[in-house]
Image (tube, rainbow, N blue to C red):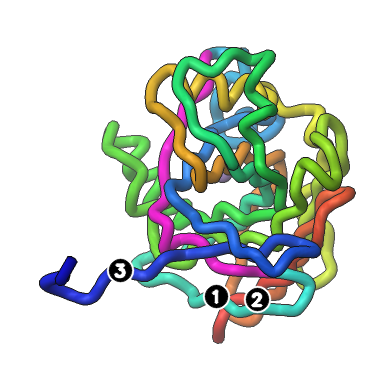
Amino acid sequence: MKYAIPLPPTYTLTIQGSDEAFPVNRVFCVGRNYAAHAREMGKDPDREPPFFFMKPACAVVQAGEKEITIPYPPKTSNFHHEIELVVTLGKGGKDISIDQALDHVHGYAVGLDMTRRDLQLDAREKGRPWEFGKSFAKSAPIGPICTADKIGHLSSATISLTVNTQPRQSSDIEKLIWSVAESISYLSQYEALEPGDVIMTGTPEGVGAVVPGDVMHGHIDGLVDIVVSVSK
Ligand code: MN
């Protein structure tokens, strides 16, 4: 096959303890999946059905214990951190039952759903899509994947984020309103999932702004930490 233009790049993530790379297909993000974060965003944290938005694969940036730098994006003056448990899928499927859902999980990682909050809230107010607030290049720094066959599945673990060593976000993934299995099952009723899909499971309370020069340190017990700075 001859292509008319150069092939678009494949975005990948490293896998802890392996020299294989994980190719990223689509990135699905769960909105408002911790009650205390729903409240801080001015919403009732009732267990209403989960909702999702997407980021393009080019949102994914490899992060890890060694500091990486992401650009401060254009058209915002309120660039927010959201620390999240990231799930990578090794197996696709549709109408996946909750009981079977974890069989589709390839692994877990620490990630950031970086958000242009001013653009997101403006869109929310006008009933418009969140794309400009959420779906932009390098908006999802994600650490190395720890595979489920090595570490098992996570049901409780501390999740935290510091900015310049000051605590900003701290919770436990057992507080997810919709569990990993429930999120996979629900999503798969609307869209056939594919190997390479990535799910960002939502952020706990304590979201806030970063400015150029800030250094974020993300942690989830049992996974590899990430250190991400914002370019000056
Ligand atoms: Mn998020």
Going from N to C along the chain, the mark reached first, 3 or 1, is 3
- What residue is shown at x 56% (from left), y 40% (from top)? 199
- What residue is shown at x 42% (from left), y 53% (from top)? 118
The type of residue carrying mark 3 is Pro
Disc 2 to disc 3: CB gap under 8 Å: no
Mark 2 highlights which residue? 229
**Element type where label 2 sits in the image:** strand
Tell me the number on the disc at residue 53: none
Q: Is residue 50 magenta?
A: yes
Mark 3 highlights which residue? 8
Going from N to C along the chain, the mark reached first, 2 or 3, is 3
Separation of marks 3 and 1 at Cα, in angstroms: 21 Å
The type of residue carrying mark 1 is Ile
- In which image quadrant can residue 58 be found? bottom left
- What residue is shown at x 58% (from left), y 25% (from top)? 183
The type of residue carrying mark 2 is Ser
**Element type where label 3 sits in the image:** loop
- Disc 3 crowd rating (10 Å Cα; few below 14, some 14-19, many 20+) is few
Q: Nearer the viewer, residue 75 or 49?
A: 49
* Residue 6 position (above or below residue 177): below
Q: Nearer the viewer, residue 202 or 97?
A: 97
Mark 1 highlights which residue? 70
Left or right, 4 with reference to 99: left
Residue range of the region highlighted in magenta in the rendering: 49-63
Quarter of the figure with the C terminus:
bottom right
